[in-house]
Image (spheres, coloured by chain):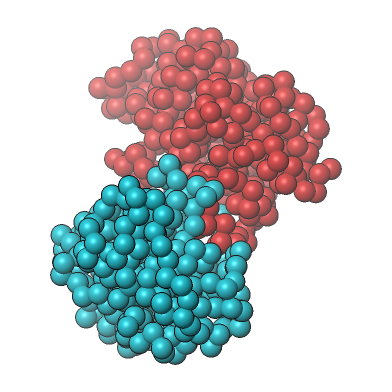
Chain colours: A cyan, B red
Amino acid sequence: MRAVRLHAVGGPKNLTVETVDAPVPQPGEMVVRVRAAAFNRRDVFITQGRYPNIALPAILGSDGAGEVAAVGDGAAGPPIGARVIVDPMLCWGADPRVWGDDATILGMPQAGTFAQYVCVPARNVHPAPEHLSNESAAALPLAGLTAYRAVFTRAQLRKDETILITGIGGGVQTFVLLFAKHIGARTIVTSGSDEKLERAKALGADVAINYRTDADWHKTARKAGPIDVVVDSAGGETFARCIEIVRPGARIVTYGGTTGDATVRMFPIFWKHLTIMGTSMGSPQDFASMLNVVNAGKLEPAVDSVYDMENVAAAAEAVERNTQFGKVILRIG
Amino acid sequence: MRAVRLHAVGGPKNLTVETVDAPVPQPGEMVVRVRAAAFNRRDVFITQGRYPNIALPAILGSDGAGEVAAVGDGAAGPPIGARVIVDPMLCWGADPRVWGDDATILGMPQAGTFAQYVCVPARNVHPAPEHLSNESAAALPLAGLTAYRAVFTRAQLRKDETILITGIGGGVQTFVLLFAKHIGARTIVTSGSDEKLERAKALGADVAINYRTDADWHKTARKAGPIDVVVDSAGGETFARCIEIVRPGARIVTYGGTTGDATVRMFPIFWKHLTIMGTSMGSPQDFASMLNVVNAGKLEPAVDSVYDMENVAAAAEAVERNTQFGKVILRIG
């Protein structure tokens, strides 16, 4: 089969398309013929060597949509030929509150979705939402799962509340916006790009703030509040400012720290009885619930662009530039 | 009546004992004849000018035990002469998750317990635990309430878990230790004083670490773990280290920041799915539940020392030096 492989770190340009053996399902596993995959920041971090425990060579890719191609002994799930998507969270563990020691994410070390075939445990294979194309369905798994857990399982956002979504544009944050609007919550988004802010408004964002042209963006956000919930993956000063501006009793969810460490004042944390929640990926229950919400609302993931597999390096460089709004998709021929 | 008043900030020495009018209960209020009061860090911070919205002159003191002396119209509660303690949290509000905008703490601006008589809403007056002297009962309210909410309402500590209590010795942390031991949890305490660590061990602490002689105290604590819950009021580097050493899924509760801002890495927060919870004081439900636990376990608060009211400045200086283990009590003649 054709597959995207990484043999050495050094950036997106090191991603190469090669011919390798197709996987054979073991008992309890399924092989999915991938028709579309999606990029996550994780894939780019791995090419750059900025990810823990990198093992190479590897087939990257956590997100995939396609059809069931082969079923191992005793594997229960959708039948051969069924349109499916793959939950990239492998071996979450027994505790819904936190992943276990054996948890891993599909796509390094286990061969991922940037290939014509991917082999996963049958319990990770779910029917694809009928209203979505393969390209749009491939946008769902990792980002939708992370966003669902952040918004609902962790922050427990309610429809009468206001959520601040910092740095709109990435895959997860666009899903946070979709989910928040779906339940009727009020949304404040920030970005350094007016174009991304316009696209967020088109998706229903109520307030849009450009942090490059508004140095006091956090004060502007506070005035547009009161802010009940924040979902952030910037960390650093963004995270520290969020602690200052939220209302008493607010919940702040973090799933990343792209701008580095945060120096925070303790006083607003305890005086306002804040709750700061870390999250990463999500449990099998989270994934099933996320699919239910997407199906119930016929939600359409934001797709930035679609690349053919042969142009995988260009696709990864687009993610590296961080100019996208929504997911960057890889069409698998 | 005789009362301790503060006319100007400038430290504990500015506390003076004066004769002032005794309070008269308004409808819904009760006047308590105070027999013993207790110091909190808050009282010393106010004398130092390190507290928000200081209004002077003021009678300080949040904690008091004594007898009901007078009852206003329509005030339901313990009868005149009953031994009582006072919940210092005034006007918490309707939301058990966070105090409301009108919430205040007894003892500045409202006249506090460092006086022969204190007037409070009747709903703040509770029967004193029968097994406690006035001095021990006075140790309970603010510190016991803060500790109860931190351990149970916020962290939801369970008996099969391990809790790290940083900086044992202060009033709240000694209650955290008492409550944790009461439910059978495993406890790790830290202090810069071997004497405080010995006293903590006498109260049942399972592991005691001196952070002055063990520069890598946090690694020692991690080895003694895994740590499920932390209760901290130091902030700063202590708080940052706690984030590094707790187990996945851990809860870290903060109710103070005596050592300043904390510079934290985002990665362990989201990768370990941590929950960081701020807390301050507690709701009426928390206070009632705290009393239930103290009564059920016949728990005995740690009392460091007892001063006569006339020696209030010396008592406050003892708290300022931070050498105490447990509460510093003021006996009201």
The residue positioned 44% from the left and 78% from the top of the image is A3
User: Where residue A223 sits: x, y (%)?
Assistant: 34, 70
Direction from residue B47 to residue B81 in the image, left or right: left
Direction from residue A182 to residue A253 in the image, left or right: right
Direction from residue A15 to residue B126 in the image, left or right: left
Q: Is residue A56 visible?
A: yes
The residue positioned 44% from the left and 50% from the top of the image is A92
**Which residue sits furthest right?**
B213
User: Where residue B305 sits: x, y (%)?
Assistant: 71, 23
Q: Nearer the viewer, residue A216 or B122?
A: A216
Q: Is residue B286 above or below residue A328?
A: above
Q: Nearer the viewer, residue A25 or B212?
A: A25
The residue positioned 15% from the left and 70% from the top of the image is A131
Direction from residue A187 to residue B43 in the image, left or right: right
User: Where residue B122 sits: x, y (%)?
Assistant: 35, 25
Q: Which quadrant of the figure has residue A64? A: bottom left
Quadrant of image for the N terminus of chain A: bottom left
Q: Which quadrant of the figure has residue B202? A: top right
The residue positioned 32% from the left and 28% from the top of the image is B26
Q: Is residue B95 above or below residue B127?
A: below
User: Where residue A304 sits: x, y (%)?
Assistant: 32, 83
Q: Is residue A290 visible?
A: no
Q: Nearer the viewer, residue B186 or A241?
A: B186
Label count reads: 0
Q: Is residue B66 above or below residue B170?
A: above
Q: Which quadrant of the figure has residue B46? A: top right
Q: Is residue A265 above or below residue A194?
A: above
Quadrant of image for the C terminus of chain A: bottom left
Q: Nearer the viewer, residue A15 or A263?
A: A15
